[in-house]
Amino acid sequence: MPQFILRRLMQLVFVLFSITFITFIVGHLAPGDPVQALMGNKRDPKLYEQLRHQYGLDRPWYEQYAGYVFGVLQGDFGKSYRYAGRPVWDLIKQGVPVSASLGLAALALSVLLGIPIGVLASVRANGVFDRTAMAVMLTLFAVPSFVIAGVLQTLQVILYQNSLPNLPTSGWGKPENWVMPVLVLAAGTMGYLARLTRSSMISVLRQDYIRTAWAKGANARRVYMVHALRNALIPIVTVLGPSVAFVVIGSFVVENVFRVPGIGFVAVQAISTRDYPVIQSVALLLALIVAVMSLITDVLYSLLDPRIRTQ
Amino acid sequence: MTFTILRIFRSRVVLISALFLAFLLLTALFGPLLYTVDPAMGDVDNLRSFPTLAHPLGTDDIGRDTLARLMMGLRVSLAVAVVVEFFNVVVGAGLGVLAGYFGGWIDVIVARLADMLFAFPGLLLAILISAIFGSTAVEFAGGAGRLLLVSFSLALVGWPLMARYTRGQTLSLKERLFVESTRALGASDRHILWRHILPNLAGLIIVSATLDVATVIVSEATLGLLGLSAQPPQTSLGKMIVEAFNYMTLNWTQVLFPGLVLALLVLTLSFVGDGLQEYVERG
């Protein structure tokens, strides 16, 4: 076991290197002059050189990369172009808890709805519930989140126009603001989890030990929930990592469609002001979260299924 | 043998999806020739109109005809998809086959590059690249530059998957008896690659590319929605949807139409892709 975790940690080191290297290179090649951005409209060659030296921009790129990684490790994501000299972290830190709570709520909802729907569908495979639920889940998974957002928002507008109870289509702060973004963000992952749970359950239900469980007289609840689900959940754990990636990228869209002030929203605003370090840092932060989550998933998986460790 | 591919149409879902896709493709190609309304021209008397005789699908907030713009957006989506898949097949499959066939340093380089790109959530990297180099691309090549950049960024995050598939298949193909016998007969690597490896991979490559088109179209729409893809006067499906959000309370049909086209495009593509996959795997 420790060996497996060690090997996985080595992989994480490579992944972290890749992520920081890619964001560094993209930022390094970004158009515009960071030093001039710091100086604003001033033209002063001496000050220019001084600042260039101060920020280490006169050093070779690999030294700059080392400096960049070192900074990130200490929570220094660089300085904004737009707000001269303000640390990027200052600009995105308010968005972090917003994005995190939105993402976690969506992830929780997709697990809490997706898995039970998949289990119920597998109980009577090809029955009416199975067919309807799986068609809906396929649609939720295949249709892009912003289209679902559009459909839901349109519905709210129609409700509003007919003076029926409705939910706000944008904004953040009140509890009712949560409903739509969380639903939309959860939709894709929920569809995916439900379909995966169903197929995983169906293959487990064919096993001999399930027949044994029925034969010894266990009731349906015990067979499905204890004998079958426990094993059916193992492959589902493996997709939690990719699900996080899905939610993270989805939050970019959802935050902008519903005007939720998370880091995805901040990043898109930074696009229009060409504040590259902000975009770069948000991408880095999100990629790091996805990398760490996929590590946790793998370790969890190896705890659940000992066969994985020996591979 | 030539027409066994038609078997996939025995499934009604695949047949309907393929017909619908053909319809969309023909609309994108020839629609603007038949329906000659200028997509950039605003009809100031009919702002945000619901579907009428003059504007079959209504107009947007500055009176531009939605049907004409939809066809333009469809063209953008499909053009980006074609460029990305071209790149995916040439670079991704090309490198994958070479890496699998020759092994050695080329394999190491391709595998490492692919691993590096896999480490970064795909669409996130595409967002990063199109956001940072967008203005540069426009300076170089105008509106088309932006679309090329979007295509490039999506291809950059897409090729490693194609390379991984083809590499694995090549590894097992090159050990097969017919390849060994060809080599024993004195065939060159080039001959084996072109005549024996690639024809055997063609099915797999076509299936992966088809299934990937749906992903690319959604990704392009997402970039469009974030303002990173087509710029005015051009448009894209994602951009049309997000622009229509702003006046949804006045006219919800303008969110509906591009959304519906996008959703159906993605669903039918995945049905046809699944049908093809089944055909290739089962023969």
Image (tube, rainbow, N blue to C red):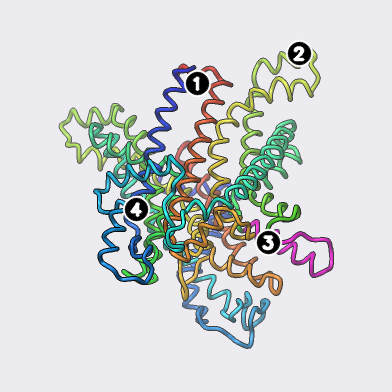
> Where is A273 relative to A63, above or below?
below
Identified by mark 4, the residue type is Phe
- Taking depth in this image into account, of B139 and A235 the one nearest to the observer is B139
For numbered disc 2, what is the local secondary structure? Answer: helix
Quadrant assignment for the C terminus of chain A:
top left
Q: Earlier in the sequence, mark 3 or mark 2?
A: 3
- Residue A252 position, x and y percent, is 55, 54
Mark 4, Cα crowd under 10 Å, few <14 / some 14-19 / many 20+, is: many
Q: Chain of mark 1?
A: A
* Helix, strand or loop status at disc 1: helix
Q: Which mark is residue B87?
A: 4
Q: CA distance from mark 4 to mark 1?
A: 36 Å
Disc 3 and disc 1 on one polypeptide chain: yes
Q: Which label belongs to residue A215?
A: 2
Mark 3 lies on residue: A170
Do discs 3 and 2 belong to a common subunit?
A: yes
Q: Nearer the viewer, residue A82 or A84?
A: A84
Mark number displayed over residue A194: none
- Real-space Cα distance between discs 2 and 4? 56 Å
Question: What range is drawn magenta here?
Answer: A147-170
List the residue tagged with mark 1. Answer: A308
Mark before the other along the chain sequence, 2 or 1: 2
Specify whether B133 is left or right of B249: left
